[in-house]
Amino acid sequence: MATNHPDTEIVPYLRGELSADEQARVGAHLEGCAQCRDSADASAAILSNIARVVDDVREPDWAQYRGELKRK
C-alpha cells in the first residue's frame, strides 16, 4: 500500500497554518512515519534558525541605497 507523505504540508503544520482536520491528519502521519518525522525535525530546526537570525537583520538605509543607485 502506498503512503501519501505530507511533504508540502510539513512546514505549514509546524507553523500551525493548517485547519484542525489537516493538522490532526499530518500529526497522525508523523507519529507513524519516521521519514516524515525526520523531515519535520529538520524543518523545525531550519525555521528556528531563521527566526533567530531574522531579528539581526537591520533595516536598509533607503536614502543611501537611492544615492548609490543614482551614482551608478
Image: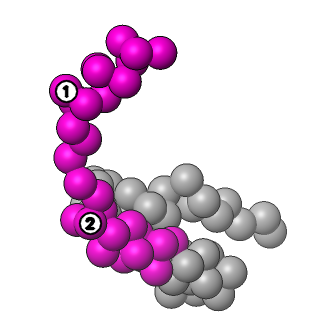
Residue 62, visible in the rendered structure: yes
Say few, some or many: other residues with alpha carbon within 10 Å of mark 2 (under 14 / 14 to 19 / 20 or more).
few
Q: CA distance from mark 1 to mark 2?
A: 21 Å
- The residue nearer to you, when weighing 28 against 60, is 60
Q: Quadrant of residue 67?
A: top left
Q: Amino acid at mark 1?
A: Ala
Q: Which residues are magenta?
A: 43-72
Residue 54 falls left or right of residue 4 = left
- The residue nearer to you, when weighing 8 against 42, is 42
Q: Callout 1: helix, strand or loop?
A: helix
- In the image, residue 72 lies at what x, y percent? 47, 15
**Is residue 43 placed above or below 4 in the rendered structure?**
below
Please state which of the two labelled residues, at mark 1 or mark 2, is closer to the viewer: 1
- In the image, residue 39 lies at what x, y percent? 60, 75
Q: Which residue is mark 2?
A: 56
Question: Which residue is painted at 36% across and 76% down in the image?
Answer: 48
Question: Which residue is painted at 30% across and 74% down in the image?
Answer: 52
